[in-house]
Amino acid sequence: MVGVNFIQQVSRARNGVGAFVLPCKRITITYCNFGGSSQGTRDFLRQRLPKFAKQYPEVEFRVLEKPGKHPVLKGEYTTPNTFTSENGDTIKQICVRKWNIDIVENKLKLLINSSGKKLSKPKHTVISTNPSVRGIWSPFYVDPNHRYKI
Amino acid sequence: MFSSRTAIGHKSASRVWNASTKIQNRLISISPAAVQKTNPNSNSNNEIISKKYKFSYETAKNKSIQNSHLSIPNNKFDFANYNNNNNDDEITEENAKLIPSIVSLHARLQLSPDYKYSTLVKSLSCPIDSNSNFNNQQLSIFGSHILSFYVSEYLLTNYPRLPISILKSTIDSYIGNFSLYDIAKNSWGIDEDSTSKLEKYLSNEPELFKFGRLRFIKKVTKPESNIIKYSNSINNPFELSKSEAFANSVRSIIAGLYIHSGEESAKNFINDHILSRQVDISSVFDFKEPGKLLTRLLKTNNMLSPTVRLISETGRLSNSPIYVVGCFSGNDLLATGEGSSLKEARVRSFVRALKAWYLYKPLDAKVPSDSNFNGMFVDDGEKFY
Amino acid sequence: MQSLIPSTTIQSSRCLSRNFSKISQIRQYTNAKISYNQIYNKNIIRQQQQSQQQQIRSIVYVRGQRVQGLIRDPSEILSTDGVKYGKENDNLKPLKEYLNSLELSTKIELSDDILLQIITHKSFAHGSKPYNANISFLGEQILQLAATKYVISQSGNLNAIGSLAHRFMWSDKMLAAFAESKGVDEVFFCKKALPGGKIDKLYKPKSIYSTITSSIIGAIASKYGKTIAEEFIEKELIPAYKN
């Protein structure tokens, strides 16, 4: 149009407005087949994993054997720009060395419920991408009785 | 020898080649670093289309398919007799169910059980060579038509006064390549198949699992340094940029939704996943001369031309003054603007007045595809000077 | 003479008395018949305004052949191929007749304003009149989706999508030809870019004339919704492709 140019934009995600897509997409469980530190993880894999994985069909579970290493739970997330692995995915890792079956399960739940973002203390009480509903201040918003008089 | 050479060169060159050997010698002496003559005929049709359209969503809609395996009937409008000579099902439904990333993507998007897993696999495979028809080319064209319609009807009913260029730009910011890339990569978690065959072998991964990732031929825009391209061949027609490949997968998934669970669920899916994203339409506008445009706008609406009056000010003699001015038409206040100089405040008030007009939003607008739709606001068209 | 002064004059003079502005515009409308290359100029000088030391600028309109730097008579701008803009003079007749002849599940009754808007292109009178850009955009979108849906419903697979015939279904050529075949393009307000402002009734640029068809679809959709618009496409446009 004459007189109006446009500035191109990219839409911003608002996960949960409309559809909610679970940010956690993959969980890799590594364990050692004989190490004592993997005892709880091995128990979890044997006893609870099939049922647990059925509860979370959104998440892809991978089990890797790493002989001689401590067991590690690794979550991969769709959320961008935080901790990144070599292929650019956001990851979060928890070492479950020497931990028993219940703690391993709780840690897995923690990974699944996480957004993948780095933990940080919020500096503002309200965080929003929307502009302020209040608009720009004008002196006329103040009641005439309460205005500052010179 | 001739035949192998002529296969590389284009038609007109091959004719000269056969005629005299002199020219042949000269051709050989040309250094590979020299600028290659591009043959206008060899440009793929899709490249021409992408030059014709300004926005990536328009390019995606108007793509043409040249499929050598397709037999086209004599009457081209006899759509029922378009036959494909290739086997379409490269990955069967049973095999697709074995791919964990496909199953988890299906669950993550909360697709209905009617949605076939093999369609998801097909959506993730971009065309790689002309031998196979198992790709998302046609799915993505269909998907982009669905997307384009639902997004534009939403914008036309909710912001009926948007100028066409702004409207198209806004549609592009919802369903352009970059936005859909962001959806596919950063919200749906679609992976790109970037590992080599060797890596797959070393990681003990089944051959089938590669179909769970997005497969495409990457367009190399920047060749590596110190590497000279000797190949005479023109760009591979199946090359795609990363954003386009991801965007096409989203378009195809939506087309699959239409095919498997109907138009209504495709519409709801678009509402949930695409229209729910945030686009700040007011910052799409970039006015060149807002005052001129506002005067014209008021004139065509039989209103008095704009006058700017100072409402309040502070710190005129300081280094950081603030003025608040109002843009009036007669006695009506159209908008206020603030700024550190009178001129800035004035221009800002014009821009706000224009945006207040163009971003008019009817309350609780229904879109034409709603069942309880009863008419929409039709705009006169944007004003220009 | 007083009655011929356009309303803007009255507004601006009212404005001037309030704001004490020094310059005002008074538009004078010469009603006399102006022949080829002749310009009539008349100044209205009011004694009262002179005493207030106000400058008066008179505006001269030109009719007939265009003269560079001079403003044309508005009545001349507001016409195409000799047809005057407006709802009168049977301008809407071809379109109304066509819409009445339709046999859809709902009777199509559009208001005169929107019918006039359908047959007004953006290029007409510098966009000062309501034009069809927005409804034709909506119509185009519906047509593209409906065409794609039609192709799929015919074949049951996606083979024909992206083919030449599929993309032809919403091309300008097709839409302009449809409008001509139904006779709805008899009256169409647009500005044809012909050298020297020539008039040629047979010259119908496809990209401009195609907007008639798409805006009919858009107008139907804007009042009756998508299903009726799709029915219109299926019953009217798609049979036309086959010929």
Image (tube, grey):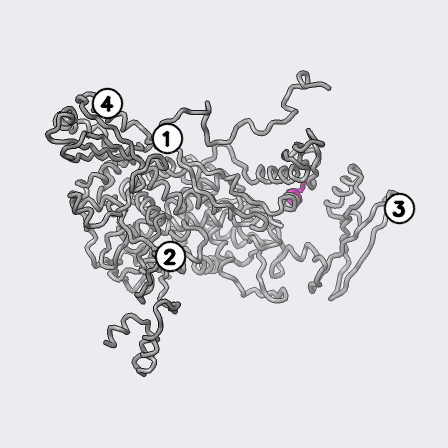
- The answer to whether tags 4 and 1 share a subunit is yes
Dot placed on the residue nearer the N-terminal end, 2 or 3: 3
Where disc 2 sits, the SS reads helix
Between the residue at mark 2 and the residue at mark 4, the CA separation in whole angstroms equals 55 Å
Amino acid beneath label 4 = Asn
Task: Name the chain under label 4.
Answer: A
Residue that mark 2 sits on: C167
Task: Name the chain under label 2.
Answer: C
Residue that mark 4 sits on: A106
In the depicted structure, whether residue B268 falls above or below residue B88: above
Q: Nearer the viewer, mark 3 or mark 4?
A: 4
Residue at left offset 80%, top offset 58%: C41
Q: Residues within 10 Å of mark 4 (few under 14, many from 20)?
A: few
Residue that mark 3 sits on: C47
B336 with respect to C4 (left or right): left
Q: Looking at the rendered structure, which numbered label has been put on residue C149?
A: none
Amino acid beneath label 1 = Gly
Q: Looking at the rendered structure, which numbered label has been put on residue A16?
A: 1
C142 with respect to C48 (left or right): left
Q: Quadrant of residue C199?
A: bottom right
Between the residue at mark 3 and the residue at mark 4, the CA separation in whole angstroms equals 94 Å
- Of residue A116 and residue B217, the one placed in the foreground of this image is A116
